[in-house]
Amino acid sequence: MPDHALLHKLSAFLSPHEIAADAEALLTDQRRRYTGEAAAAVLPDSVAQVQRIVRFCAEHRIPITPQGGNTGLCGGAVPQGGVLLNLSRLNRIRLVEVADNAITVEAGAVLQTVQQAAAAAGRLFPLSLASEGSCQIGGNIATNAGGLNVLRYGSMRDLVLGLEVVLPDGELVSHLAPLHKNTTGYDLRHLFIGSEGTLGVITAATLKLFARPQSTATAWVGVDSIEAAVALLTLMQGQFAERLCSFELLSAWALELSARYSGTPAPLAAEWHVLLELNDSLPAQDLDGSLAECLMQNGFDNAVLAQSGSERQMLWRLRENVSAAQRDLGASIKHDIAVPIARVAEWVRQTGAALEAAFPGIQIVVFGHLGDGSLHYNTFLPGVLDQEVYRYEAAVNEVVYRHTLACEGTIAAEHGIGQVKNHWLPQVRTPAEIALMRAVKAQLDPHQLMNPGKLLPPM
Amino acid sequence: MPDHALLHKLSAFLSPHEIAADAEALLTDQRRRYTGEAAAAVLPDSVAQVQRIVRFCAEHRIPITPQGGNTGLCGGAVPQGGVLLNLSRLNRIRLVEVADNAITVEAGAVLQTVQQAAAAAGRLFPLSLASEGSCQIGGNIATNAGGLNVLRYGSMRDLVLGLEVVLPDGELVSHLAPLHKNTTGYDLRHLFIGSEGTLGVITAATLKLFARPQSTATAWVGVDSIEAAVALLTLMQGQFAERLCSFELLSAWALELSARYSGTPAPLAAEWHVLLELNDSLPAQDLDGSLAECLMQNGFDNAVLAQSGSERQMLWRLRENVSAAQRDLGASIKHDIAVPIARVAEWVRQTGAALEAAFPGIQIVVFGHLGDGSLHYNTFLPGVLDQEVYRYEAAVNEVVYRHTLACEGTIAAEHGIGQVKNHWLPQVRTPAEIALMRAVKAQLDPHQLMNPGKLLPPM
């Protein structure tokens, strides 16, 4: 609930439009899993205003939760009191420099807007994910977002050349020059990337650009097993190398749900489905021909190649609608894991068996970015009423994460930690590592004001 | 000078061959610029032995300097007392996993050995630099090495999937699984990459592999100005994208020196020279034809394309011999800077003019990796006797670095900080950043035992 005395103090240095009239709308995340609270919600217009807000909060020991598009899946941008600092108005494209293959944008710029600005300069900004129409660059950086093109272009971490950050005491640190090589001391940029707003407020970034794809080939391939899908991946990487930009896996059931939801028939029948895409920066490369030949020669003949742009879109819609299609099944317990690609099959088999033993009748939707070893693994408990499902969350997670760690995997591939997994951190990082994280935090944010309750485990 | 009491204590847990008989040989860096001292030099056989050594030194408060191939250019691996910990014997290739496009190697593995192990698995490990026959992976990681292929594949930082590190108290932290996506808390891996042995001892790493190039096209292009070279770079990146793997710049004088030294005529006459290379992971791509056509159509007609493997090697030798060719000129004051590519021309012009004004007759060899904005900029003072040159080092650096910072550049592109540039760090990082670096250091290494005198500025 709003704190009127605080709002009054803030209005001393913020314009009326920099104070949210309806803070409520910003307190619940996009998928309505978490609702937080804030004494005030502010939307500063400029970096200088961000500094003023942060300095004010530091002086008055008021917690701050930075927020971008609020599309995160781990509740990282849902405040637990204090000031909600929404970056949406800080959304300029500051500079596109083609000679340096770089673009400098503010934190509140929507990912799609950045993609479009790159396109207008004849370049590609490759980060692509389901929420690209509303997620913001600052949040993408704060969570080290992944998505569909990581296989070729890397995660957000790999795309950042420089950052501008307001530290928890209000100081601005700016390193936005597009330097492709730089070795001046410990790399602090990568500390902020993925720090989920706990170390300061990212206000701008310089990002890498790439050449635009000029030719594309898209195939849907049916295989009998995940092992066969991994063999296909290895084949594609050996043959097409960086041309392979996406390699997505869907279980038969994931496809069935999505096909029904999309009103589109499944392109083919199989136990497991792969959607893969090649692209090339040179026009008129016969990618379709090479891909078809390679698939046939290697026995991957249960396959369909997109023959047109609309066929390609149709295939991608089947992949993209997997998430939406699951809503009809009720609430699910979601996971965002990665294991070494060579162990994905083992992980899926063992985790599925263990869950079925513990929760007979459990339903599992498996899909994700096999090219990166990263899977979304959503579990449904039929007969358990909607939100009641979350009573089983800890027990289901325990099984899923135990198997993930046994396969040398990670419990957080691309969605971050937020307030969902922070108590799991001591399972995946040693005490020395967590002590180092806390030392970094204490140095920058001695009063623990930046996004409290997120990322780091409770003390 | 060796400390016999210390050697005796070390021999209690080290085999005779793990204690260097001739420590002297390890105390001077490869180019004989720095000579250090050590009470003992050890070459452990295993990670467990590294842990024992580090634990022993921690208990007895003895400084440790980790050392790989000792090829660094900034004196980072030259000890200033204590124990010299050479990783050369820790040199196994532990695992190549093609499905994950990853290789796990120990710190002492020579870069070329890693390249060869990748090749044996049908893959490419792309880091390539002049000292690849003797530099070691641990040192490449500790200094975030760059080199010839950064344009396409990134610096060492971009090639590391995971690290195994012995912390300054002897604890082993191991994250070697080949995970392409992972967002579990602050990224500590990137703190160790580029930390120059000041935070712990890197003992192994999991590195990214890539498809092997199957077709190559190499061109030598003469241009009138750096501006024209930058225009050529932008053209090449727009046309050939990731196929462009090297884009090297040489001044006419750098080429003249190298041609004379190499006994090879210059391929063409021009003010500035570009050596560029395209490669493709598909065989039988007509890269030569496309490259020739693109150069001609865009007016870059003062150009030579390598018509054979030996012609290609000859062109590369001219580039690679630039360093060696300078030795005849006597000692030089070297710089390893980068500025935004769009500002390289401005930087070269302004810095050259300022140096000539301050040091009339100064000779400057300009060459480097224009594709990354990174230049080697070596200055000679004719008439100043060899080692006497270094009396002018601070004054020359002051001019060079002042102009670098004015162009938003970095004073350390790919050689690191070591003991050469640490006093410059406060000029390029804010007090808050240096305080954070010191806090990281204090947390991991409270007794300041790891590689003292390097990277961080003196207190």
Image (spheres, coloured by chain):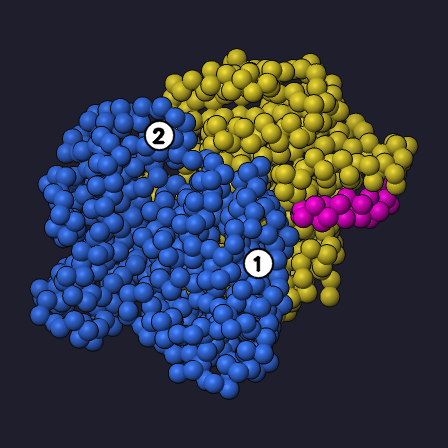
Chain colours: A blue, B yellow
Q: Is residue A105 visible?
A: yes
**Residue type (three-letter) at the residue carrying disc 1:** Glu
Crowd band around label 1 with a 10 angstrom C-alpha radius: few (<14), some (14–19), many (20+):
many
- The residue that label 2 is drawn on is A215
Q: Secondary structure at mark 2?
A: strand
Q: Residue at x 21, y 60 (%)?
A: A378
Q: In the rendered view, does A369 fall on the left or right side of B387?
A: left
Label 2 – label 1 distance at C-alpha: 35 Å
Q: How many numbered discs?
A: 2
Q: Is residue B78 magenta?
A: no
Q: Residue at x 72, y 51 (%)?
A: B421
Residue range highlighted in magenta: B389-412
**Residue type (three-letter) at the residue carrying disc 2:** Ser
- The residue that label 1 is drawn on is A164
In percent of width and height, residue B37 lies at 73, 53
Q: Residue at x 68, y 51 (%)?
A: B418
Q: Do marks 2 and 1 both belong to one polypeptide chain?
A: yes
Residue A225 figure quarter:
top left
What secondary structure do most residues of the magenta stretch adopt?
helix
Residue at the front extreme of this rendering: A16
Above or below residue A180? Residue A411 is below
B211 and B132: which is toward the camera: B211
Counting residues from the N terminus, which is met first, the one under dot 2 or under dot 1? Answer: 1
A262 and B271: which is toward the camera: A262
In percent of width and height, residue A422 lies at 38, 70
In percent of width and height, residue A303 lies at 17, 34
